[in-house]
Image (cartoon, rainbow, N blue to C red):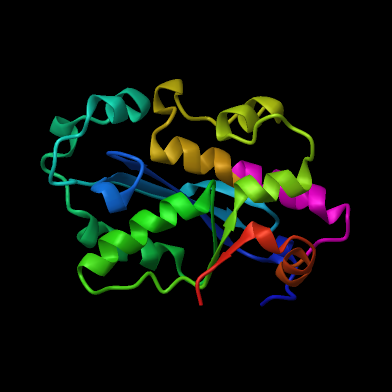
Amino acid sequence: MYNTPFTEMSFTVFDTETTGMSPARGARLVEIAAVRVKPGLVVDLQDTFSSLINPKTDIPYQAYAIHGINTRMVADKPEAYQVLPQFLEFTGNSIVAAHNAGFDYSFLTHHLEEKGLSTGLRCIIDTVKLSRAAEKGLKSYSLDNLIHHFDMKIPLPDSYRHRALFDAAHTALLLCICLKKLANEDICTPAQLFTRHRQTFHIFR
């Protein structure tokens, strides 16, 4: 697997929305979404996962102002421990990626560990660090800035901005852009990426 070219692999790129910045401080998931990248580095918007999540607490206005999800919208939705196993089943054996992966992973592990469960993930590619390796010298590697820098256009309504599916789709496209750029430096497999840019991986076991 580690010597398989990225162009022959499948990826699952995901994003979360939350009530706050840290699960250690009581923040909870309110949404998770994922988009598949097929072999050939093709973003497949027909193969997605998306679910609102009931955090069992009120969603602060500061969080609502970012993602537009309010307490009423999630009142009848499943809890995280019900949604996350479905998400992990969706990821299958694909390579998983996220923008600022440590943030999203911290929420996955927090909610699953509450129920004595594990993600089972071995590593996640962090597209913040991947984009720094592929496109050096930008002032900001926020997803917003990278969407503008690479002139990304995904056919989703603007109203989805900062919702999990919108961000996952754009992160998936960012992943493809970065891997294609790194291929020009003869970085074409996970093993080569790990050797040259180990920091792009979050490794858990």
Residue 94 left/right relative to 106: right
Indicate whether residue 183 is drawn in magenta.
yes
The residue depicted at 52 percent of the width and 41 percent of the height is: 169
Residue 120 in picture, x, y percent from top left: 41, 74
Residue 106 vs 174, above or below: the answer is: below
Q: Is residue 86 visible?
A: no
Q: Which of 197 and 169 is in front in this view?
A: 197
Horizontal arrangement in the rendering, residue 140 relative to residue 59 (left or right) = right
Q: Compared with residue 21, is residue 61 higher up or lower down, i.e. above or below?
A: above
* Quadrant that contains the N terminus: bottom right
Residue 111: in magenta span: no
| Residue at image location 49% in from the left, 43% down from the top | 168
Q: Is the magenta stretch mostly helix, strand or loop?
A: helix
Residue 91 figure quarter? bottom left
Residue 29 percent coordinates (x, y): 28, 47
- In this view, the residue farthest toward the front is 25
- Residue at the farthest right position: 185
Residue 121 is left or right of residue 42, and the answer is left
Picture quadrant of residue 106: bottom left
Q: Is residue 4 visible?
A: yes
Residues 127 and 114: in front is 114
x then y, percent, for residue 79: 18, 53
Q: Give the range drawn in magenta.
A: 173-188
Looking at the image, is 162 positioned above or below residue 119?
Answer: above
Write the residue at 66% across / 57% down.
200
Tell me what residue is drawn at x 65 percent, y 31 percent: 140
